[in-house]
Amino acid sequence: MTSLKALGGTSDILPDQARRWQRLEESARRLMDLYGYEEIRTPLIEEASVFTRSLGDAAEIVTKQMYLFEDRGGRRVALRPEGTASVVRAFVEHGLDKTAGLARFYYVGPMFRAERPQAGRRRQFHQLGVEVFGSMSPYQDAEVVELLMHLLEKWGIQGAVLRLNNLGCQQDRPKMLEELKKYFAQDYNNLCPDCQQRLKVNPLRILDCKEEKCRLVSQGSMASSKWLCPSCQEHFQQVMKVLDALGIDCEWDQYLVRGLDYYTKTAFEVIHPGLGAQNALGGGGRYDDLVEALGGLPTPAVGFAVGLERILMALEEKEAGSSELSPRPSVFVAPIGEASLSEGLKLLGALRAAGIPGVMDYEARPLKRQLEQANKLGCRVVLMLGDVERDKKIVLLKDMASGAQIEAPQDVWLETLQKILKPVS
Ligand code: AMP
């Protein structure tokens, strides 16, 4: 019988790796608390229209990448390909558009996109994102960007590059699309087939194309931002000014559009040059019209999402060989013979009560085998207890680093152990 495997583009996270994930998430949660962002958890599965209405029918995520199916009740449902649409749906569904005033959320969890798997591109991947509702202020855009940069710094990411662009508001969009259409129509034959299609549906996305020939054509297309209204221009300048005041380096990239249709005004992206083809760590922007588009009151909003697999990839080299990443149970309880199992259990309970991580062998294997096992697990100390020790009213402690064996009287074994475990200063 053939053995079963995880689906392509999905991965198991085994304990060694799970430890890295926990560290990432824990430090992120601490930072979110510090900035006053609260966690929101939404379902992984939604009515498909949550995404088609938010991201736009023409967005590649919707047309090519969304896991879409009919459930048993005949409803069209989708696995969430991103977090923002669900958070907005929840925000409106719970009437927060009417009551919340300013609301700052964050989420962490898996997203699903049917992409061709490759390094840094998975079908199930994880994002941490933030969404802020109720502020039009450029200071809020800057806070969100600053939070992303702070997060990367906390995680130890170095060399990340931040790029920003101004995409204008809904009033600016028709003019912008019309000008881009005119511009690209002149060079129609030099565009890739996908971009020829994009020209009909959404010429803005041509700016995002990775094909060299399309990039060449794009150059010059945004040379003037004349279609942007004064208020959008002013907003963008303010964002840049605040970021400058916060000491955050960034580049204005006129060709940055991001993959989703809902962005207005500020859009940004952070890349990591060391990551190869899939080098975007995260990105986001303002989406002032989305809450209303999903049936809520007009509510300005801004957010970002960062891909956790890519963060871990970027950190991989730095972490290589770091033992700090895999703290192991520090104590191994090795009962010698069946008769000592229940006493072993008592020792184990006492360890845990004292907050010392410990494991025990319940099979009453020969001591030599138990010591091998303790060694494999990287335990610092082995507690040994058999008939001899019981008669002598002691517990035998083996310091695995030095090999020394200490006979500790039964009433002070825990203190003796704690002395061995104490880090040498
Ligand atoms: P997006 O929602 O497309 O703006 O993506 C935000 C971030 O999520 C990206 O910068 C990546 O770090 C990550 N990401 C997006 N798609 C994938 C994927 N298929 N596999 C792994 N990470 C991804």
Image (cartoon, rainbow, N blue to C red):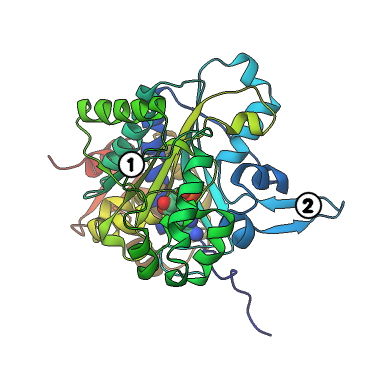
**What is the x, y in percent for residue 195?**
50, 64
Residue sitting at 26 percent across and 49 percent down? 160
Queried on whether the Cβ of the residue with tag 2 lies below 8 angstroms from ligand 1, the answer reads no
Query: Can you say which quadrant of the picture contains the C terminus?
Result: top left
Mark 2 vs mark 1: give the one in front: 1
Q: Which residue is tagged 1?
A: 164
Q: Which of 286 and 122 is in front in this view?
A: 286
User: Can residue 149 be seen at all in this image of the molecule?
Assistant: yes
User: Which of the 4 image quadrants contains residue 274?
Assistant: bottom left
**What is the x, y in percent for residue 275?**
31, 61
Queried on whether the Cβ of the residue with tag 1 lies below 8 angstroms from ligand 1, the answer reads no
Q: Is there CB contact under 8 Å for labels 2 and 1?
A: no
* Count of marks, rendered view: 2
Q: What element carries label 1?
A: strand
Tell me: 181 left or right of 89: left
Residue sitting at 46 percent across and 48 percent down? 179
- Alpha carbon distance from label 2 to label 1: 36 Å
- The label on residue 15 is none
Identity of the residue furthest to the right in this view? 73
Sequence order check, earlier mark of 2 and 1: 2
Above or below 404: residue 238 = above
Identity of the residue furthest to the left in this view? 425
Q: Which residue is tagged 2?
A: 76
Q: What element carries label 2?
A: strand
For badge 1, the amino acid type reads Leu
Residue sitting at 63 percent across and 20 percent down? 96
Tell me: 423 left or right of 25: left
**What is the x, y in percent for residue 387?**
42, 55
For badge 2, the amino acid type reads Arg
**What is the x, y in percent for residue 325?**
31, 52
